[in-house]
Image (cartoon, helix red, strand yellow):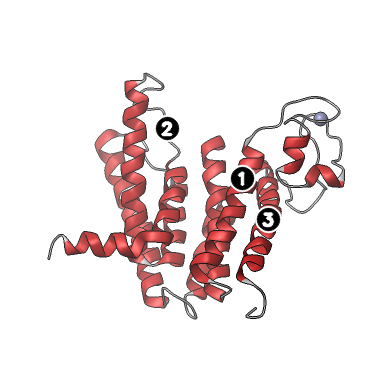
Amino acid sequence: MSEVPPILVGVLFAAFGLVVGSFLNVCIYRLPLKQSIVWPASRCTTCQRELDWYENVPVVAWLALGGRCRTCQTSISAMYPVVELVTGALFVGGYLLYGVTPLGFVRIAFGCAMIVLFVIDLQHRILPNVITVTGVPIGFALSLFLPPGWRESLIGLLVGGGVLFAIGEAYYRLRGIDGLGMGDVKMLAMIGAFLGWRLTLVTLIFASFTGALAGAAMLVTGRGGMKAALPFGTFLAAGAFVAAVAGDQIFNWYVSLYR
Ligand SMILES: [Zn+2]
């Protein structure tokens, strides 16, 4: 890739990211319904009309159609172009951080999984096993060859799964209700397998902190009571993003406070 101007590589990554984002939208819509993500072709979810090729063009199609289906006029959620734009940004960010490297592609794929989990947990309060449970062995296998290395990864998946499981159990014994789902436990184990235990702790602290802030905001504004479940996986996904980008600096800064 050395002869290609970096700016051109960046544009290619952005374009490919937008197209992948369009596929992530299919995953986000179909995984909770347990439908195939490869067949049939994309349809309007209301009138079931199969989409023309140009209606699948990321972002542009949504803007050109004014966010509505061409035939039935049902409005199409702005979540679709947002997911496409965020995925495009993920690809460009991955390129800027890691260049065209194996680790770059792994981190981008991991980011794609986090985007899908973020939105599905937000919309349905579930975290599909097909991503979380599948992600644990994949993350560990990749760490045999790539950072964070297999020891970091193994401790990460054990800490990720174990700590959350212990918190969930303690919460259940104290309050008698399920504060955390097993989905969150499996998701943090996957994050541990991909990022290692240090970044997993950064992810957990970030998610707990922002989750608590959101919970407090919901109480203050009177939207939902104490028992209105927050989508913790959504906060974990955001935390994993932050950890993957700046987790090492955050971890070292935090440790230095106690030296
Ligand atoms: Zn329609």
Real-space Cα separation, disc 1 to disc 2, in angstroms: 23 Å
Which label number is shown at residue 83? Answer: 1
First along the sequence among labels 3 and 2: 3
Within-10-Å neighbours for mark 2: few <14, some 14–19, many 20+ = few
Of labels 3 and 2, the one closer to you: 3
Q: Is mark 1 within 8 Å of ligand 1?
A: no
- The percent position of residue 159, horizontal first and vertical second, equals 33, 62
Q: Is residue 20 above or below residue 70?
A: below
Disc 1 + disc 2, Cβ < 8 Å? no
Which label number is shown at residue 3? Answer: none
Report whether 76 appears left or right of 254: right
Q: Residue at horizontal 46%, vertical 66%? A: 194
Q: Which residue is mark 2?
A: 229
Real-space Cα separation, disc 3 to disc 2, in angstroms: 30 Å
Q: Which residue is mark 3?
A: 20
Q: Residue at horizontal 65%, vertical 68%? A: 9
First along the sequence among labels 1 and 2: 1
Q: Give the residue type at disc 1.
A: Val
Disc 3 + disc 2, Cβ < 8 Å? no
Question: Helix, strand, or loop for circle 2?
Answer: loop
First along the sequence among labels 3 and 1: 3
Q: Give the residue type at disc 2.
A: Ala
Q: Is residue 184 above or below residue 94?
A: above
Real-space Cα separation, disc 3 to disc 1, in angstroms: 10 Å
Quarter of image, res 227: top left
- The quadrant in which the C terminus is found is bottom left
- The percent position of residue 258, horizontal first and vertical second, equals 13, 61
Quarter of image, res 14: bottom right
Question: Helix, strand, or loop for circle 3?
Answer: helix
